[in-house]
Structures are given as structure tokens and as C-alpha cells.
Image (cartoon, rainbow, N blue to C red):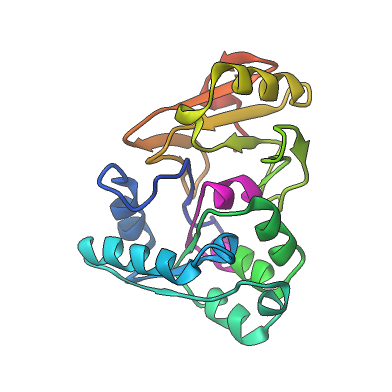
Amino acid sequence: MSTGPLALVGGGEWQAGCSFDRDLLESSGAGEVLVLPTGAAYEHPERVVEQAQAWFSSLGASSRGLMVLTRRDAMDEANAAVVRGSRFVYLTGGSAMHLRSALKESLVWDAMVHAWNDGAALVGSSAGAMVLCDPMVDPRGGAFTLGLGLVEQMAVIPHFDTWSPEKGHRTFQLAPAGLPVAALHEQTALVRAPAGGWSVAGAGTVEVYVDGKQAGLDVLPS
């Protein structure tokens, strides 16, 4: 049994450059996108959902928000059931640390993994992309910390096209030896196909580094 498609987005989501969303809708067969604004719990999550609804409507799909904003929400069986039954789940950006603490070892997280293993598309943008990996970059200082671990032995840096060379260099120096770090530009997705293998889609580029040196997508875990 293969998983569904997985997309790690570098931020700047739901804009014209995000051509991959249409492809993900087609490959997943989903008519509705379930948006979890957990990372944006303290940043007007309802506005985030409205932005998603406008974008996916332009692509001919519906979307709705599931307000999993706290740890209690993430442990709610009714919320988990909604996630488990979805064919396209989208984790938004915001606070990676809050997102991790809310979802870690929760019913909603288990449901998300179940849906993905059952063929649903799973997308994480910005903080949402960071937490899906383990380890993840700690946004507070550029070091590395525990992520949720859907993808193990890989880390991502979103919004990399807005980083200074010095900040990027410091993060690559702090990375554990041999760890692939994928630096994602905004409006750009690193996409894992259901059968395995990674590709880049969208408006920008993805740069992969191992031990501070650039490498190809083939070093990423399949």
C-alpha cells in the first residue's frame, strides 16, 4: 500500500505560483481540502481559512477549516474523525513550536498519518512543512529540535529566499552530520510521490545541503 502525495511548501502559499495545488487535487481525487490553521492559532486563524477557501475555489475545489487550535482540540475524537476521512489535509504556517506541541502524540496527528497512509494528500506550508520532518529547524535560533517525524532524517527551511547568507550558513553548520537540509523558496513545494521519490514544483527552487555542501534530491529519504 502506498501513501498519498506529500508536499512541503516554503510559504507564500495560495498564490498564483503555487501550481502544485492543482496537481495535488487531481492526484488525490479530492474535491475538498481540509485546512488546519493550528500553527496560526494566535494569528487570526479564521482569516487563514478564508484565504485558503478563496484560492481553492479558484481551482474548482471547496475547502473548509477545522479549528484544531489547542492541545485539547487535537485530542478531540470528533476532530480526529474528520481528519481521518479527508482526502486532502493542509497544515498552515504560523508557530512551528505551537504546532508541534498541539499535535504531538495526539488523536488528530494519528488520524492525519492514517489518512496519508490511506492515500490522502498531505501538505504542510512553512511551519507546517517544518514539523512534518524530524529533526526540524528551531525557528527561535536556527538550531535543530524534534519534529513530528512523518519524514525522518531530513529537515526543511521554509522562506529560504528571504534568509540572509549568514543565517543560512549558520543553520547548515548546526545541522547534524549527514543530515539533508532542504531549503525551500516561497511558492515552491518539495513533493514526494506516493511511490517515493522527490520533485520540485511551483515558482521557485529548492536547494539541498548535506554537511554545508549542496547535494541533489537523491539524498533525501525515500
Quadrant of image for the C terminus: top right
* Residue 164 belongs to magenta span: no
Quadrant of image for the N terminus: bottom right
Residue 181 quadrant: top right
The stretch of residues the image draws in magenta is 115-132
Q: Which residue does the image show at 51% across and 78% down from the upper left?
A: 85
Q: Nearer the viewer, residue 158 or 154?
A: 158
Residue that sits furthest to the bottom in the current view: 78
- Residue 188 is left or right of residue 62, and the answer is right
- Residue 141 is left or right of residue 30, and the answer is right
Q: Where is residue 103 in the image (x, y as percent from the top left)?
A: 69, 65
Q: Which residue does the image show at 50% across and 58% down from the upper left?
A: 92
Q: Which of 13 and 111 is in front in this view?
A: 13
Residue 154 quadrant: top right
Q: Is residue 29 visible?
A: no
Q: Which residue does the image show at 49% across and 67% down from the upper left?
A: 44
Image position of 102 with respect to 222: above or below: below
Residue that sits furthest to the front in the current view: 43
Q: Where is residue 101 in the image (x, y as percent from the top left)?
A: 74, 61
Q: Position of residue 99 (x, y in %)?
A: 65, 59
Residue 110 quadrant: bottom right
